[in-house]
Image (cartoon, rainbow, N blue to C red):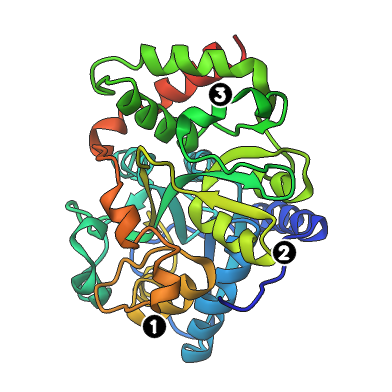
Amino acid sequence: MPALRPALTTVAVLTGTALLATACSSSATSPSGSSGDAGGKQTVTFMGFYGTFQDSFTKTVIKPFEKANPDITVKYVPIQNSAEVLAKLRASTKRPVADVALMDSSVAPTANKEKLFAPLDAAKVPNLARLVPTAKSKDGYGPAVTFDSLSILYNSKNVKKAPTSWNDLWNAEYKGKLAMPVADTRGVALIIALEKILGGDYKKDIDPAIDKLKTLAPSVQTWQPSPDVYTAIQSGDADVAVGWNARGQFYKDSSQGVVQPVLPEEGTVTQVNTINLVNNSAHTAAAQKFIDYAIGAEAQKAFDDEAFYAPVNEDVRLAPETKERTQASAEQQKNQIPVDWAWLTTRYTAWVDRIKQEVIGG
């Protein structure tokens, strides 16, 4: 069992929010017709997810990178989700507020199409050649940096019989104690899982899954747990929820087993975060050096050992006890529900809108 890790505190969330406000108002870079890396110490502004992700990524990726590259500082701008990144980059195309940004693979193609991101130079990012096939971008844009999967979370003190199926979300004993933050990729992934259970085809019709979710609405205590679903489960504000496996595993340790993530028996959906070079960055060479480090074997192993994501670099070998708790485990690999994310990109917003309007607001 890995050593216990510190839990996310309210202070950390408030601090992250303050950092976001400061960074977004002061970190804009000027457009660049060249690399913009003229020498001297440079600052690469990185947009990444807040909370435990920020803590682990800073510790295992950013700090070692800065030590190895004393001429580059990485400024972390915490964000809530990919939609926030997309909005901020759309509002700052000529003077981008970041040089590198994380984005969910279901949203990143939209940013690529709008030229918010730039293709990478393979000569400057040699670790692109060391990625597993599913981590590579066929168009040369930002590759995957993490693999994760959707899971059920539950509070082991309050729930006596652990859920094992997506259908268990409808159990009467959980009524009024569900946390369902599904107005994003979690909801999109859940629709795909429910379509499989219902014998449908998500490419043809998601009405069955939407109708199924509508019947769950009366049992939901909150659609937007604060500060997040993991602390809501840990505190007992909610008993059962949907969330991502990696953070669930992190909180399992930090809560001393109170938070428990579950891989449902019907299978789950892989979630991919990509790491991207922002178009018009004034520091493209330094930014690509940082991206190369983040997808390299050393950083991938260190981060995944800490945060329980599956590695994207083929040279990484996780300890068996760590691997079994990630998307790379034999059980999770066997139970992955296939998803055509390239196809889904054009439907993603419409699906999220239906969740908001018909399920949450219905």
Residue under pointer 2: 7
User: CA separation, marks 3 and 1?
Assistant: 43 Å
Crowding near the residue tagged with mark 3, few <14, some 14–19, many ≥20 C-alpha atoms within 10 Å: some
Q: In the rendered structure, are the residues bearing label 1 and label 2 in contact, judged by CB atoms less than 8 Å apart?
A: no
Residue in view at x 62 percent, y 13 percent: 361
> Along the line of sight, which residue is nearer the eye, 326 or 54?
326
Can you say which quadrant of the picture contains the C terminus? top right
**First of labels 1, 2 by sequence position:** 2
* Element on which disc 2 rests: loop
Left or right of 111 on screen, residue 26: right
- The residue type indicated by label 1 comes to Glu
Crowding near the residue tagged with mark 2, few <14, some 14–19, many ≥20 C-alpha atoms within 10 Å: some
Residue in view at x 67 percent, y 27 percent: 173
Q: Relative to 163, is 177 above or below?
A: above
Tell me, for residue 298, which label it has, or none: 1
* Element on which disc 1 rests: helix
Q: Relative to 274, is 154 above or below?
A: above
User: CA separation, marks 1 and 2?
Assistant: 25 Å
> Along the line of sight, which residue is nearer the eye, 230 or 160?
160
The answer to which quarter of the image holds residue 161 is top right
Residue under pointer 3: 170
The answer to which quarter of the image holds residue 20 is bottom right
**First of labels 3, 1 by sequence position:** 3
Q: Residue 55: give x, y in percent of width and height.
A: 63, 68
User: CA separation, marks 2 and 3?
Assistant: 29 Å
- The residue type indicated by label 2 comes to Ala
Residue in view at x 43 percent, y 60 percent: 281
Q: Quick one: which residue is furthest to the right in this view?
A: 11
